[in-house]
Amino acid sequence: MKKFLKSLWILVGALAGVAAAWRLISRRQALPCPAWLGWLVENPLMESGAGRTLDKVDLHPGMRVLDYGSGPGRLTLPAAQRVGPGGEVTAFDMQPAMLSRVQERTSAAGIPNIRLLLGSAGSGSLEQDYYDRALLVTVLGEIPDRQEALDEIFAALKPGGLLSISELLPDPHFQPKATVRRLTTRAGFDELDCTGRPWSYTLLLRKPAAAA
Ligand SMILES: C[S@@+](CC[C@H](N)C(=O)[O-])C[C@H]1O[C@@H](n2cnc3c(N)ncnc32)[C@H](O)[C@@H]1O
């Protein structure tokens, strides 16, 4: 038992070391979660959290949803099921391998209303005033210019549209609540709700109805 606990602590320490090194390197150069580490989000534990995240954004049939930094589609697929065939979910990601995984899963599940959009944050590839909802789940810290990304999401949402941002430790790119609040306020969002703990939280924000 003692030997097991010692090995466990060594493993936890090693993982914390890798996360800290990754975070440090990311400050100098963007290091997004590589596609071969997609299993870190595509696993039963993380998949079960997707439903709870979606519950908070009040999805209805017919809505258009933007999954910004979709990864392998952990939220994309259940969101598409919730908005139904009259709605649409855009999986937006900079890594072709992530979008290929979304495509594989979409085809296997027979979900027709998912659009794949390859692009980098701030590249101007999103429609304006188009989306009812946007999801930004464990992505923000991977983006070099976070303000530009939030400005882009603000422009892509319809007036009155909602943005849900989730951050979770031990993600090496974790962003504290105060930082996210500062950036989202500057982009023009109003905060509606905040749930969770300082180390695992979801912020719900709204683009003001009067915003042009
Ligand atoms: C940790 S994964 C999270 C995936 C998904 N949101 C989830 O929670 O399961 C982060 C994703 O954001 C994408 N990403 C990171 N930086 C990006 C950027 N600048 N533009 C577009 N996508 C980006 C990465 O390619 C990766 O697929």
Image: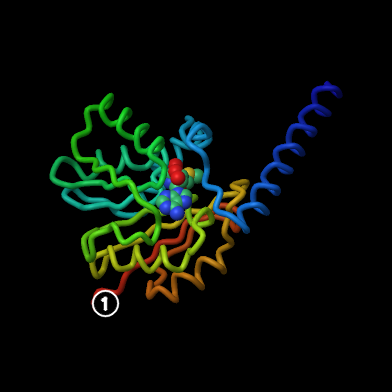
Would the CB of label 1 be found within 8 Å of ligand 1?
no
Amino acid type at mark 1: Ala
Colour scheme: rainbow
In the drawing, does residue 58 fall left or right of residue 174? Answer: left
Image quarter of the N terminus: top right
Residue at 44%, 76% (x, y): give it. Answer: 186
Viewer-proximal residue among 121 and 102: 121
Q: Quadrant of residue 114?
A: top left
Q: Residue furthest left?
A: 86
Residue 196, given in percent of the width and then of the height, sits at 53, 55
Residue 137 visible at all: no
Residue 8, given in percent of the width and then of the height, sits at 76, 29
Image quarter of the C terminus: bottom left
Q: Residues within 10 Å of mark 1 (few under 14, many from 20)?
A: few
In the drawing, does residue 26 fall left or right of residue 119? Answer: right
Residue at 51%, 39% (x, y): give it. Answer: 34
In the drawing, does residue 129 fall left or right of residue 37? Answer: left
Mark 1 lies on residue = 211
Residue 125, given in percent of the width and then of the height, sits at 29, 57
Viewer-proximal residue among 172 and 22: 22
Q: Quadrant of residue 81?
A: top left
Residue 169, given in percent of the width and then of the height, sits at 60, 49
* Vertical placement of residue 100 versus 115, above or below: above
Residue 150 visible at all: yes
Q: Quadrant of residue 116?
A: top left
* Vertical placement of residue 16 versus 193, above or below: above
Count the numbered circles shown: 1
Residue at 35%, 33% (x, y): give it. Answer: 100
Q: Secondary structure at mark 1?
A: loop
